[in-house]
Image (tube, grey):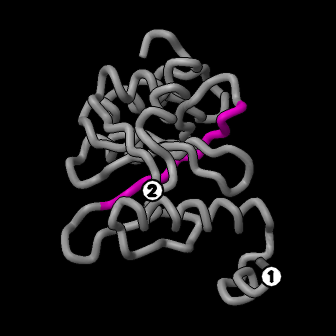
Amino acid sequence: MYKFQEKFDIYDTDTTINSVRDAIIANYLGYDLLNWDKHGFDAKKSKVNEFLEVKQCSISSGTWGGTWNDTNEEKALAFSDKRLFTVVGVWKGAHDLQFMVYGQHPQLGKDLYRMVTQRKKGSRSTQSISIQKMIKEYQFQVICPPDKGKEFVYTLLVNYSKKY
């Protein structure tokens, strides 16, 4: 881990783990250009003009979903762009990817925009959207990593919420 941190000049452990996770997910989804900077989207496909925003959550958290921190109106609306895809990786521990929820839908940007503009005045701009909403309303795909089977992921989803 230290060699990785030195190579990319990332010495904060949380940032390092999130960067590695972003790279793993981007690789699974075919995004070959990674953004190591703090700002901007996480990855891009070099052959087409598609971008990826990666969100992470723990399998042990009470709510599975993506969280957008410090989002402004312009960034929220960007998620309506057909070139911007979103993925939520659900992890067990620091390195065991359980599954991903991936897709693009213009309503995601509209919902984020509404949340940004209707938040309590003076509050931090933090928006959360559940994977349940992503799957049911936005028609995002559930993607199994190579070492997990469909039945395993289906069981996780059903145990989390009988609505699946």
Pick the front one: 59 or 38? 59
Instruction: Identify the residue position indicated by label 2 in the image.
Output: 146
State which tag comes first along the sequence, 2 or 1.
1
Left/right of residue 159 with respect to residue 113 in the rendered view? right
For marks 2 and 1, give the CA distance: 27 Å
Residues drawn in magenta: 51-60
The amino acid type, in three-letter code, at marker 1 is Tyr
Q: Please name the residue shown 36% across and 27% down the image.
A: 135
The amino acid type, in three-letter code, at marker 2 is Pro
Query: Crowdedness of circle 1 by 10 Å Cα count: few (<14), some, many (20+)?
Result: few
The residue positioned farthest toward the top in the image shown: 162
Left/right of residue 102 with respect to residue 90 in the rendered view? left
Instruction: Identify the residue position indicated by label 1 in the image.
Output: 2
Q: Please name the residue shown 50% across and 10% down the image.
A: 162
The x, y position of residue 136, in whole percent, is 33, 21
SS of the residue under disc 1: helix
Is residue 160 shown above or below 72? above
